Image: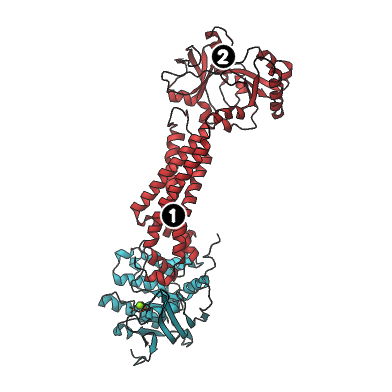
Chain colours: A cyan, B red
Amino acid sequence: MSDPFAAAPSPSPSPAVAPASGPTREATVRVAAVAKTYYRDQQPIPVLENIDLTIQSGEFVALMGPSGSGKTTLLNLVAGIDRPSSGSVVVAGNDLHGMSERQLAAFRSRHVGFIFQFYNLIPVLTAFENVELPLLLTSLSKAERRKHVATALEVVGLSDRRDHYPRQLSGGQEQRVAIARAVVTDPTVLLADEPTGDLDKRSEEEVLVLLRRLNQEFAKTILMVTHDPKAAASAGRTVRIEKGALVAAPKDGQA
Amino acid sequence: MSKFLHLVVRNALRNRLRTVLTAGGSAFLLFVLVFMLTALTEMYAWEGAPATHLRVAVQHSTGLATPLPIELENYLRGEEISACAGHLIKLNWFGGYYQDRRNFFANFASDHKEWREVWDELSLPDELYKKWCSQKNAMVVGRGLAKRLGWKVGQQVTLMGTIYPVNPELEIVGCFTGPTPREEEQLFFRWDYLDELLGGRKVVGTFWIRARTLDDVARLKDLIDGHTKNSSDPTETMTEKEFGQQFAAMMGNIKGMIAILGSIVLVILVFMTANTVAMSARERVTEIAVLRTLGFRRSHILFLVVAESVLVTLAGALFSLGIALVLFNWLLLSPSPQFPVFLVEPGTIAVALGAAVLCGSLSALVPAIQSARRKIVDGLRYVG
Ligand SMILES: Nc1ncnc2c1ncn2[C@@H]1O[C@H](COP(=O)(O)OP(=O)(O)OP(=O)(O)O)[C@@H](O)[C@H]1O
Ligand SMILES: [Mg+2]
């Protein structure tokens, strides 16, 4: 078998060495006329209808809405782990429509950093190894990988926990490791699905500070699903979704 | 893919008890396989004689149990045969035992003259050979056999006859060595001594001739069997390989039976391992979806699941092979007196390792494909 990893793209320099560049305002995410319908026992379940959403490079957008409104579904479409029933999703110039599974995997590896509500670290790997995981898909050497992981762990303030296993970390620490894993490849966009949903007040604040810093200091483009208005306040802009459709956000851009 | 081996190993060690049980099960089943294959190779060891061997055996056409007339020796030493044959000895299967009938080993009454030329793969130092030639009740013993029975050079040993009504008292004058422990599990004493004990009846079991060339082997068969064809004692002249095959034929279709038993063992191995892999895969549905979210491809997931399964069965194989090699090849233990030695052959090791890889892969196939094909969103929403 040929090594399928060899073909994976290598990431650009690690986050810490790529601070905010000039305000190049180009669309990083462009969702146009997207609809998504699930089928359960041949019964159509329309989840998203006619969604248009554009996120500029360097933006931090919060996505809010009631439970079951389709937030996770929309995030998954942008992440390229699900396909829309109709409409188009373009991320970093890549039209996800018509991409093969293989191309989508390469796209995710190169452009997407995903942060889950329940961290989803691999329990048998240390913090270091968890963060290294996405880099294994690149052609980086072992030494280069080590350097990138060290940088990412430093950014999230967990350099001293590199050899700890997830069960030896608090929820907040686990989520910060997960954030390090999401940024270590220097992806084009960070997608976070209720990243503070499972955390206590203090950890929540730490994670939000971290995300703000990634956005402001390192110019990361972030789309974050949240139920919490306080979390949404960290974002530069809030988008609301209700019953599968975006609704006008009341006070746009308020911090 | 080697970058992912640490993940494979950690995954395998995640549920230690389960992994140890599965590897132990594989080890046990593969041990059974190795055991059966080794029994088979031992039973057919004679048959394994290289086809290029120059030795030919002359036995009575009705079978080994019928003796040959001593007069045949004159013909065999005559001009016609000497043109194709360099050396000749008389050899009788004595079939005796030492102290206990269950002590099975090969023992022969053999001409001592030309013994070294006919049995050229055995090596016996010159001075010991001379001693054997100078002393009628002397015998030479394979090194392994002597060690196994605790015999020392100079010791007197009485062999109890089963075929012949005599119990020769023999003195060990030396040990010979062979290319493998198998050749060292036999002994030779002098044919003229046996004949003396039997009162000079000149009973010949077989003649063994060393042909000069491979072409001479075929020529010898035609000459000897042609010469005796119309006599009262017709002969059958065979290569060493053919000689061995007549024993193999007596054992019936053991090969077929072992093939069936071996397949059953492997099928059990596949099902046992498949059960473990399926359990692990079910527990890791979310994790696999997370890996794929990070950019792992389907082929990576296939690799991770299959490699973990192969790792476990291979660990079992290495364990059982280690045990088998120590017991049988190193300590030279034999599971049954029927086998003087019980040597695990390189071919058997290769088969066991191959079976482990094959069964490991086969067991993982269905769960691996399922895991790789599951949609990521379904995996992330999955609640075990
Ligand atoms: N794979 C699927 N198959 C069938 N229905 C689905 C699937 N995924 C989501 N749904 C349905 O789509 C709707 C939207 O789900 P989604 O997870 O996007 O909501 P959400 O806004 O993220 O909700 P929450 O705030 O509870 O996370 C729900 O009714 C859900 O049951
Ligand atoms: Mg959701």
Disc 1 target residue = B309
Please give the chain letter of the residue carrying mark 1: B
Disc 2 target residue = B191
- Density class for disc 1 (Cα within 10 Å; few <14, some 14-19, many ≥20) is many
Q: How many marks?
A: 2
| Front in this rendered view, residue A233 or B65 | B65
State yes or no: Cβ of the residue under disc 2 lies below 8 Å from any atom of ligand 1.
no
The furthest residue to the front: A42
Q: Where is residue B140 drawn, in percent x and y?
A: 52, 19
The furthest residue to the left: A201
Q: Secondary structure at mark 2?
A: helix
Is B359 on the left-hand or right-hand side of B17?
right
- Density class for disc 2 (Cα within 10 Å; few <14, some 14-19, many ≥20) is many
| Front in this rendered view, residue B246 or B144 | B246
Residue shown at the point (41%, 68%) measured from the top left: B289
Residue shown at the point (49%, 47%) measured from the top left: B355
**Mark 1 → mark 2, Cα distance in angstroms:** 59 Å
The C terminus of chain B lies in quadrant: bottom left
Quarter assignment of residue A238: bottom left
Q: Secondary structure at mark 1?
A: helix
Residue A48 in sight: yes
Q: Is residue A214 above or below residue B117?
A: below
Chain-order first, disc 1 or disc 2: 2
Amino acid, disc 1: Ser
Is A255 on the left-hand or right-hand side of B235?
left
